[in-house]
Every structure is written in structure tokens, then in C-alpha cells.
Amino acid sequence: MYVQTILSPEQAKAVVDAAFPTARVRLGPSVIVIPHDVQGMKMPELTPQNWVSRSSSAAPSIAIVPVKARS
């Protein structure tokens, strides 16, 4: 299971980007905790320094299909 707490708005993109593929690969839930004080913070303008690079050389998949059951 993937569990992360976002402590600042700048972390949101990286945490969300990691949550989805982790849930798919592990076939389990991903939990993202966003505390109330963080929800009220303003998102600053992101610069190239805030960009998150992909950790895989494989092309991203946008297909959303259920996993085939094993027999």
C-alpha cells in the first residue's frame, strides 16, 4: 500500500504522480493525506525546478482497464 502525506502544495504533483502507478503495480490502494491547513494554502507558480521527471523509460499508459484475473 502507498501512503503519503502532502505537507506543501509543491509536493502534490509528485505524490499524485507516484500514487497511481504504485496502486496499479501493487494491485492495492494508494492513500494520499492532505491536511486541512495544506488544503488552504495557495499553489505557487511552478518553475522548471519543480518539474518531476519520469522515473521510467517506458512510455506512459493512459489505458484504464481492469487487470485480467488469473486462473
Image (spheres, helix red, strand yellow):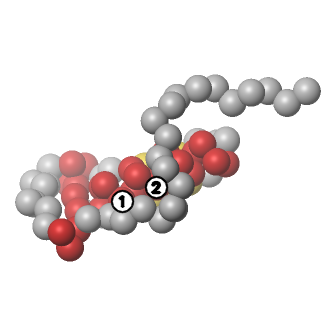
Residue shown at the point (49%, 50%) measured from the top left: 59
Could you tell me residue 12's position as x and y percent? Answer: 30, 55
Mark 2 = which residue? Answer: 18
Reading the image, the residue beneath label 1 is 14
Q: Nearer the viewer, residue 25 or 30?
A: 25
In the orientation shown, which residue stands out farthest toward the right? 71
Q: CA–CA distance between discs 1 and 2?
A: 6 Å
Residue 46 bears which disc, if any?
A: none
Q: Position of residue 55 (x, y in %)?
A: 48, 65
Q: Is residue 33 above or below residue 68?
A: below
Q: Is residue 26 visible?
A: yes
Amino acid type, residue under disc 2 in the picture: Ala
13 with respect to 2 (left or right)? left
SS at badge 2: helix
Whether residue 5 is visible: no
Residue 2 x, y percent position in the rendering: 56, 54
Q: Quadrant of residue 41?
A: bottom left
The amino acid beneath tag 1 is Ala
Depth check: 4 or 62 in front? 62
Asked if the residue at tag 2 contacts the one at tag 1, i.e. Cβ–Cβ closer than 8 Å, the answer is yes
Depth check: give the residue in front, 40 or 66. Answer: 66
Describe residue 61's horizontal placement relative to residue 11 as left or right: right
**Residue located at (91% from left, 27% from top):** 71
How many numbered marks does the figure carry? 2
Q: Crowding near pointer 2: few (<14 within 10 Å), some, many (20+)?
A: some
Q: Residues within 10 Å of mark 1 (few under 14, many from 20)?
A: some
In-front residue for pair 19/62 = 62
Please say if 66 is above or below 5.
above
Q: Position of residue 69 (x, y in %)?
A: 79, 27
